Image: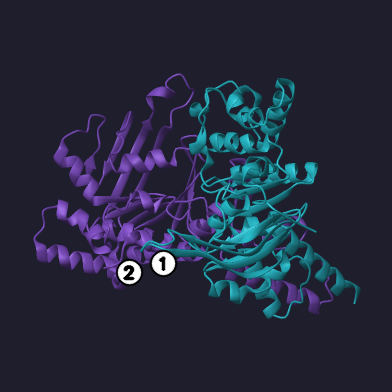
Chain colours: A cyan, B purple
Amino acid sequence: MNILELRDVSYTYNRGTPFEELALDSVSVGFEKGKITGIIGHTGSGKSTLTHLLNGLEKPSSGDVLLCGESIWEEPKKIAQIRFRIGLVMQYPEYQLFDETVRADIGFGPRNMGLDEDEIARRVDEAARFAGIAPELMDKSPFDLSGGQKRRAAIAGVLAMRPEILVLDEPAAGLDPRGRTEILGGLRDYQRSRNATILLVSHSMEDMARYCDNIVVMNQGRIYVTGTVSEVFARSEELQSVGLNVPEIARIANGLIRRGIPLSGDLYTVEGVRRAILSYVKGECEC
Amino acid sequence: MSEFIRAEDLSFAYEEDAPKVHPALDRISLSVDSGEYVAVLGHNGSGKSTFAKLLNVILTPSDGRLYVDGKEITPDFSDEETVFDVRRRVGMIFQNPDNQLVATIVEEDVAFGPENLGLPREEIRRRVDMALDAVGMREFAHHAPHHLSGGQKQRIAIAGVLAMKPACMVFDESTAMLDPRGRSEVMSAIEKMNREENITVLHITHYMDEAARADRVIVINDGKIFMDGTPKEVFSRVDELRSVGLEVPQGTELLHALRADGFELPADLIRPDECIDCLAEYLEKHSKNGGASV
């Protein structure tokens, strides 16, 4: 079931000026409930514009955004309620930290929802846990944290609103491998424990293969391809033609298949290819 | 080959670090020759960028000695002319190309550096054309930089540094924000400069597949040198790298996992094509023998 859907959405920046630019061109796409969907595409393909439309930060120039089948713009005055349900984490969210302590900063969202203090405290602690923020950091100023810790605090601020849908634009950009794993793993834990839906924009094909169920590929303001991770990464040449790629491990698996080693299954993660090779060898033994 | 960078017991502490146990850089010693292509790895906060900033005199050492292109960078290195000299020899490219572009037309942006060197007009023209050619962006000379893709913008930033004719270029996570094509464009530009212009390259990155392409990999951890060797030497030490929060290229990781499953595979293969060759050969041999020994 699609919890969130764009129906024939177009978006033009600077409409009616000489700088008019069509960023999204008749986009129709649905996002499945309880899944992690990756959004990939070259720079300027419309990914970030798409994320802004999804939680009502921008209004489509034409077309509609549907949450559980109903337009989010049905009653424009209620758009704030929609934004509590669809959380958006923009690129470099650490620049948006502002409060005196990490705890207060994470609590800003739930406080705006009008929750009581006990509930706010509960949500703040839970969000900090998912984002991997150590308890001793909670009473520090967010500006005294390292870059990676700031990023986590900013993500926790959105998690604390317990959104049903979480839209994240490059949440792991610029982090080292361990930082990437911890942040993306924490988001997956949140998604599983709350049966939430996650939409993840990233340039890392390896991360996409590891964490996503489905992938949406964008090219020049349009949807190029959608499907499961295996369906999309099976189209290696088409992806390259639009400036993307498949994970390095998938190129290795494809190379082995071309050399006459019949591998099958998940060939997009290291663990998947390892299992495929083991089952190939086992099959050979039994022959 | 002559030595371009030499650090002896080099330390650097940010002032606010004072009460902390270890400084950002803690008595590191190393030397980099002219024309070397070095990748620098390390987790966030390991001291990689601090090292890069010392080379360009954005920071000066707290302790120890640092020589760049034969000049010693001292803690009170403040003589404007010498600072200017070193900066002209060592160019830096940062993560976000948008922060490095200054003009509204590509060729004016590239000309910014040479103009500040006070060069004659014809020489500036020559250098701008040379630099744009080197990064494959000549046809965009009259475009507005903000309409280019991330990889194109980053190549304009590289051309701006190239036009200063540097001896060394430091890339501080310059591919982190780019899409796959942008990354591959920038990597090609970096490697071309190293190969054809013999420019010394220090490439700081979190992408292990990029580091695998360098001649040498230096791993910095908690302000100290943790490993220093060829990509094969460094990436074959999978468990040690993981212990400091790093990874290895996916092919190396696959072979590592299969070795744990009992396959007799080498530890020092890092490029995808060599991993494919080795695995294909191994699997063919074992299927012909009916899969014995695994």
Say which residue label 2 marks.
B137
| Depth check, front residue: A248 or B276 | A248
Q: Is residue A116 above or below residue B278?
A: above
Q: For the point 62% across and 49% down, which residue is it?
A: A55
**For residue B178, side relative to residue B291 (left or right):** left
* Amino acid identity at mark 2: Met
| Type of amino acid under label 1 | Ser
Distance, label 2 to label 1, CA atoms, is 13 Å
Query: Are dots 2 and 1 in contact, CB under 8 Å?
Result: no
Check the image and report above or below for B267 versus A171.
Answer: below
Q: Residue at x 11, y 57 (%)?
A: B119
Q: Quadrant of the C terminus of chain B?
A: bottom right
Comparing labels 2 and 1, the label whose residue is closer to the camera: 2
Residue B26 rendering spot, x and y as whole percentages: 43, 31
Q: Position of residue A228 (x, y in %)?
A: 73, 65
Residue closest to the far left: B120
Q: Secondary structure at mark 1?
A: helix
In the image, farthest residue toward the top: B19
- Residue A112 image point, x, y percent: 63, 30
Q: Circle 2 marks a residue in which chain?
A: B
Instruction: Say the numbered circle drawn on residue B78.
Output: none
| First reached walking from the N terminus: tag 2 or tag 1 | 2
Task: Indicate the secondary structure of the residue bearing disc 2.
Answer: loop
Residue at position x 62%, y 34% in the image: A157
Q: Residues within 10 Å of mark 1 (few under 14, many from 20)?
A: few
Q: Which residue is mark 1?
A: B188
B50 left or right of A44 in image: left
Instruction: Name the quadrant containing residue B158.
Output: bottom left
